[in-house]
Amino acid sequence: MAYPEKPNQILPQPIDLDKYNQYNEGEYYLSVARLVKSVDQIVSAFLLMPEKKLIVVGSGNEEEKKKINELAKKSDNITILGFVKEEDLPKIYSSAIAVIAINKKEDTPMNLMEGLASGKPSISINQNEYTKQDIEFTNTGVLMRRPTIENIILAVNALNKDLAASMKDACLLKAQRFSKDNYVNTILNKLQQNTP
């Protein structure tokens, strides 16, 4: 039921926090996204960082898949898994150093929420259009002003394995916002507020 005099709040899809509670020491950076979402920029950045490992999860059209696979063939540090079943994702998140998501159109991407629930920080886009810094630290990751290859490299080098591990508790705490209980409670509170 909508009430025109009050703005509607869009809630992100809740996640099962228990399912992602499988924290392990980080071994690689992780991209979980449709292959049309600038994943080629992430892969291109890791081609210039052969000492850093990248795993790419996601599906896409044949043209995009071919493009990503051709890029990845040029190095030994990039693994393209393609489509992965939902039940297998928690294990992949569990051993990541950080999750990389550079699609500016999404305010609360599912991959970042799943990463937080796994205790993993993120490298993502700064939604503050007025920022002057190329990268900016938060307690749950690094924000980039623009998703360029140069900024991805800068952010990955800044968010090293030790720093990422130190953000675990902050990530798990932030993930509580996206729990199923919090989702239900938020809806119930809104309904109570909007009841005449």
Image (spheres, helix red, strand yellow):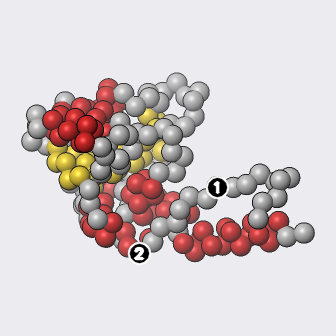
Q: Is residue 96 left or right of residue 193?
A: left
Q: Secondary structure at mark 1?
A: loop
Is residue 49 in sight in this rendering?
no
Toward the front, the furthest residue is: 62
Amino acid type indicated by mark 2: Asp
3D distance between C-alphas at marks 2 and 1: 24 Å
Is 196 drawn above or below residue 46 in the view shown? below
Reading the image, the residue beneath label 2 is 18
Nearest the camera: 85 or 122? 85
Question: Relative to residue 31, is residue 12 depicted above or below?
Answer: below
The residue depicted at 31 percent of the width and 28 percent of the height is: 149
Q: Residue at x 24, y 32 (%)?
A: 44
- Residue at image mark 1: 10
For badge 1, the amino acid type reads: Ile
Q: Compared with residue 176, is residue 166 higher up or lower down, i.e. above or below?
A: above
Q: For the point 29% across and 50% down, which residue is it?
A: 59
Going from the N terminus, do you reach mark 2 or mark 1 first?
1
The residue under the point 52% across, 24% down is: 132
Q: Nearer the viewer, residue 125 or 159?
A: 125
